Amino acid sequence: MNNIDMGKLMAMLSKMDKADIQKGLEQASKMLNEKDKEAIMKQINNNNNNNR
């Protein structure tokens, strides 16, 4: 996984409201609890494509 610029991360978080952050963390937790590695990678790729 790529290293994240902490300044950029903090700037992104400061623009999000609590509900958005909570929703994102819930999605990340659900995704990381998947047992199928392919399903995890597919979800990450889908999320990356949707955020462009």
Image (spheres, grey):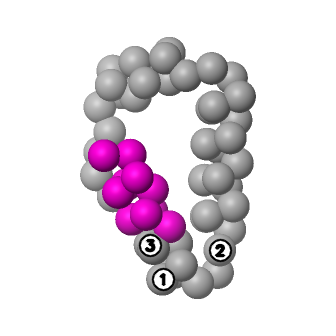
Identify residue for label 1: 38
Q: Is residue 46 within the magenta segment? A: yes
Query: What main secondary structure does the magenta stretch of the protein show?
Result: helix
The quarter of the image holding the N terminus is bottom left
- Location of residue 6 (image quadrant): top left
Is residue 44 part of the magenta span, yes or no? yes
- Tell me if residue 30 comes above or below residue 14 in the rendering: below
Amino acid type of disc 2? Glu
> What distance separates the C-alpha of mark 2 from that of mark 1?
9 Å
Q: Quadrant of residue 12?
A: top left
Q: Residues within 10 Å of mark 2 (few under 14, many from 20)?
A: few
The residue carrying pointer 1 sits among few (fewer than 14), some (14 to 19) or many (20 or more) residues within 10 Å by Cα, namely: few
Q: Earlier in the sequence, mark 3 or mark 2?
A: 2
Q: Are marks 1 and 3 in contact (CB under 8 Å)?
A: yes
Give the side of residue 34 with respect to residue 51, left or right.
right
The image shows residue 36, relative to residue 16, as above or below, that is below
* Front-lying residue, 32 or 50: 50
- Kind of residue at disc 1: Glu
With 41 as the anchor, is 33 left or right in this view?
A: right
Residue 32 position within the rendered picture, expressed as x and y whole percent measured from the top left:
61, 64
Q: Which residue is mark 3?
A: 41
Residue at 50% x, 23% y is 13
Q: Secondary structure at mark 2?
A: loop
- Could you tell me which secondary element the residue under label 1 belongs to? helix
Decide which of 1, 14 is in the foreground and name it: 14
Q: Is residue 1 above or below residue 13?
A: below
From the top left corner, tell me how far across and down residue 16 is, in percent: 55, 22
Circle on res. 34? 2
Q: Which residues are magenta?
A: 43-52
Packing grade of label 3 (10 A; few <14, some 14-19, many >=20) is few
Query: What is the three-letter code of the residue carrying label 3?
Result: Met
29 left or right of 39?
right
